[in-house]
Amino acid sequence: VKRNLYRVMIGGSSSAPQCLTCDLHEDRCQYNSAYLSVDASFYRMDCYGPGLPLYTLMDNRGSGAELQILEDNKDLENMLSEVQMPTMK
């Protein structure tokens, strides 16, 4: 089960909901949350897996472009690569 973020236009012409996270880091971000700025122009997208958490700053004024990766947990990924992690069978 995936959890994506959608934008819906209110008023004016009726349009289909736009998925903001469906094509963004698909292999890593299947469970997403967003924290919007006061005027909803920007949001922080929190990606919770199935990989390591990823936090990005997104522009909500147009196409929903990724402005900056705030935390990609590369240091944690490097540390974990040296540890044999349990796996499920």
Image (cartoon, rainbow, N blue to C red):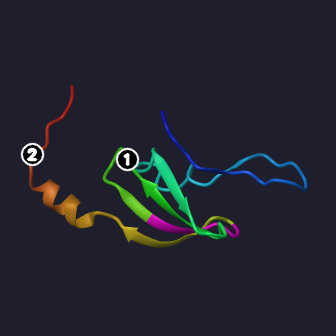
Residue where numbered disc 2 is placed: 84
The x, y position of residue 57, in whole percent, is: 50, 69
Farthest residue in the bottom direction? 67
Q: Nearer the viewer, residue 48 or 85?
A: 48
Q: At 56% from the left edge and 53% from the top edge, which residue is drawn?
A: 21
Residue located farthest toward the right when viewing the structure as drawn:
12
Q: Residue furthest top?
A: 89
Instruction: Between label 1 and label 2, give the one nearer the viewer.
Output: 1
Q: In the image as oriented, which residue stretches furthest toward the left?
A: 83
Residue named by callout 1 = 49
Which quadrant holds residue 53? bottom left
Residue 88's place in the image compared with 67, above or below, is: above
Disc 2 secondary structure class: loop
Query: Left or right of 82: which side holds 60?
Result: right
Q: Quadrant of the C terminus?
A: top left
Alpha carbon of mark 1 to alpha carbon of mark 2: how far? 19 Å
Q: Amino acid at mark 1?
A: Gly
- Residue 35 at x, y = what percent? 52, 60
22 relative position to 74: left or right: right
Q: Secondary structure at mark 1?
A: loop
User: In the displayed structure, would residue 42 be above or below residue 83?
Assistant: below
Residue 58, given in percent of the width and then of the height, sits at 55, 67
Residue 88 versus residue 40: which sits nearer the camera?
A: 40
Q: Which residues are magenta?
A: 56-62
Q: Amino acid at mark 2?
A: Gln
Q: Is residue 87 magenta?
A: no
Query: Label 1 crowding class (10 Å Cα cut-off): few <14, some 14-19, many 20+?
Result: some
